């Protein structure tokens, strides 16, 4: 995983562009600022936006190359955030500490996905919000982005099973036009979710 993403981010161009993910931005803008945890943050487009809005932001990713580009992007925008590199399962994250957490296009095997989702929920304070956007299983065969492995793609059932302890605020499977750098371009089928930790 580390080698794959280091290779992906070697180019000077930003793979997924400079603008925050639209769903992430829309959901974050509904919330009062606080502490934010971003899994798989890559080149920093979501972290830079969040930090510019006053969020105390911690970004995690597998790739050192991504961190280098993200921190350069942050300096250009005069914002600061923390960024840690390593396996999501090995990096320690405080429990019951974050006001929001986001999982934007993180695609893992089923067992790892379930573990990551548990870690994300555990990181949230009661009342904290989880935001997720990922490719649906119907994305298979499309060229607009995402893995071509059905097991790593999402279904609405995955969301129901993994986040049954959250209060669902936004929950939909949508077909939309992506325009996120060169990495996500064209018609795509995605799952979008936001939910609030209840206990």
Image (spheres, rainbow, N blue to C red):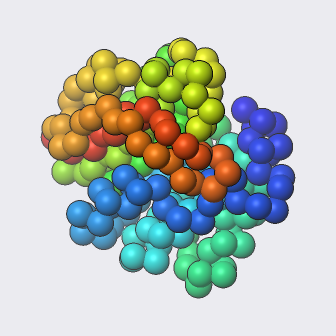
Q: Quadrant of the N terminus?
A: top right
- State the count of labels: 0
Residue ID at (50%, 48%) = 178
Tell me if residue 67 can be seen: no
- Image side of residue 199 versus residue 187, left or right: left
Q: Residue at x 32, y 45 (%)?
A: 130
**Is 179 or 67 nearer to us in this picture?**
179
Instruction: Looking at the picture, tell me which residue is in the foreground, 123 or 59.
Output: 59
Say which residue appears at 22% left-offset and 26% top-offset: 164
Task: Report the front residue among 122 and 173.
Answer: 173
Residue 4 % position (x, y): 78, 36
Q: Please report the residue visible at 26 percent of the width from the left and 23 percent of the height from the top.
A: 160
Residue 94 picture location, percent across and down: 43, 49
22 left or right, relative to 72: left
Splitting the image into 4 quarters, where does residue 8 fall? top right
Q: Is residue 57 above or below residue 170?
A: below
Location of residue 68 in the rendering, given as x and y in whole percent from the top left corner: 75, 63
Residue 176 visible here: yes
Instruction: Indicate whether 194 appears above or below 36.
Output: above
Locate the C terminus by quadrant.
Answer: top left
Residue 170, by quadrant, is top left
Q: Residue furthest bottom?
A: 78
Looking at the image, residue 125 sits to the left or right of residue 79; the answer is: left
């Amino acid at each position: 995983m580390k080698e794959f993403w280091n290779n992906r981010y070697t180019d000077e161009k930003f793979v997924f562009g400079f603008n925050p993910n639209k769903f992430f931005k829309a959901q974050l803008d509904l919330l009062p600022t606080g502490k934010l945890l971003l899994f798989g943050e890559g080149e920093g487009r979501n972290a830079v936006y969040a930090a510019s809005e006053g969020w105390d932001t911690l970004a995690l990713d597998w790739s050192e190359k991504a961190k280098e580009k993200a921190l350069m992007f942050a300096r250009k925008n005069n914002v600061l955030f923390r960024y840690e590199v390593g396996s999501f399962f090995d990096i320690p994250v405080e429990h019951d500490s974050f006001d929001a957490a986001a999982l934007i296009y993180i695609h893992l095997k089923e067992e790892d996905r379930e573990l990551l989702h548990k870690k994300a929920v555990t990181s949230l304070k009661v009342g904290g919000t989880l935001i997720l956007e990922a490719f649906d299983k119907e994305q298979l065969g499309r060229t607009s982005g995402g893995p071509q492995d059905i097991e790593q793609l999402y279904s609405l059932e995955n969301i129901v099973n993994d986040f049954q302890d959250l209060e669902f605020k936004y929950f939909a499977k949508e077909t939309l036009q992506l325009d996120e750098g060169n990495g996500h371009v064209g018609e795509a089928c995605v799952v979008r979710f936001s939910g609030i930790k209840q206990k």
